[in-house]
C-alpha cells in the first residue's frame, strides 16, 4: 500500500511583529513622591504603571463598590492630589511625576 506524499501548503506570510514605541520604553526618573511607591531607579512608563498596580493591589486600594476607582492612601494622595481617582486617570497623573 503506497502512502501519499503530503505536499506542503502555502504558508501565510509571516505577520510583522509589532515593535514597541520607543517613547514608552525610555527610562524615566520618578519624582520623590512617585519614588516612594515604585522606587527611585529610572524605569520605562509601562513598568511604572505596573509597579503602581502592584502597590494598589498589595494595599487593597481598589474601591470595593466600583473597581474602576482607586482610593488613595497617604503616599498616593501626594501623587494624585485627591482622595480617589479613576484608573483611566492614572497614566495622566503619573506624567507630572516623571522626567
Image (cartoon, grey):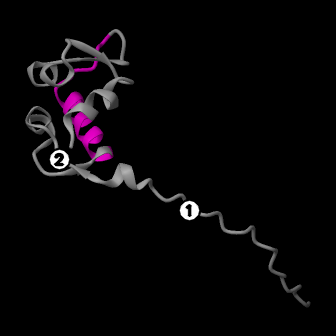
How many marks on residues? 2
Q: Does the magenta portion include 90?
A: no
Residue where numbered disc 2 is placed: 29
Q: Is 92 on the left-hand or right-hand side of 77?
A: right
Q: Is 91 on the left-hand or right-hand side of 58?
A: right
Quadrant of res 32: top left
Q: Does the magenta portion include 50?
A: yes
Instruction: Tell me the tag on residue 17.
Output: 1
Tell me the distance, in whole angstroms, between the alpha carbons under discs 1 and 2: 29 Å
Magenta stretch, residue numbers: 46-64
Q: Earlier in the sequence, mark 1 or mark 2?
A: 1
Mark 2 closeness class: few <14, some 14–19, many ≥20 residues within 10 Å: some
Q: Secondary structure at mark 1?
A: loop
Q: Which residue is depicted at the point 10% across and 46% down? A: 40
The location of residue 82, given as percent across then percent down, is 20, 13
The location of residue 25, given as percent across then percent down, is 34, 54
Q: Nearer the viewer, residue 92 or 50?
A: 92
Quadrant of res 99: top left
Q: Is 9 on the left-hand or right-hand side of 55?
A: right
Residue at the extreme top:
65
Residue at the extreme right:
1
Q: Secondary structure at mark 2?
A: loop
Q: Which residue is depicted at the point 30% across and 44% down? A: 45
Amino acid at each position: 500500500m503506497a502512502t501519499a506524499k503530503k505536499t506542503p501548503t502555502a504558508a501565510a506570510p509571516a505577520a510583522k511583529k509589532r515593535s514597541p514605541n520607543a517613547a514608552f520604553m525610555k527610562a524615566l526618573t520618578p519624582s520623590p513622591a512617585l519614588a516612594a511607591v515604585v522606587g527611585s531607579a529610572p524605569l520605562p512608563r509601562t513598568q511604572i504603571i505596573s509597579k503602581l498596580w502592584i502597590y494598589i493591589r498589595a494595599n487593597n486600594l481598589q474601591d470595593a463598590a466600583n473597581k474602576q476607582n482607586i482610593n488613595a492612601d497617604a503616599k498616593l494622595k501626594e501623587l494624585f492630589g485627591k482622595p480617589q481617582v479613576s484608573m483611566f486617570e492614572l497614566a495622566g497623573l503619573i506624567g507630572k511625576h516623571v522626567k
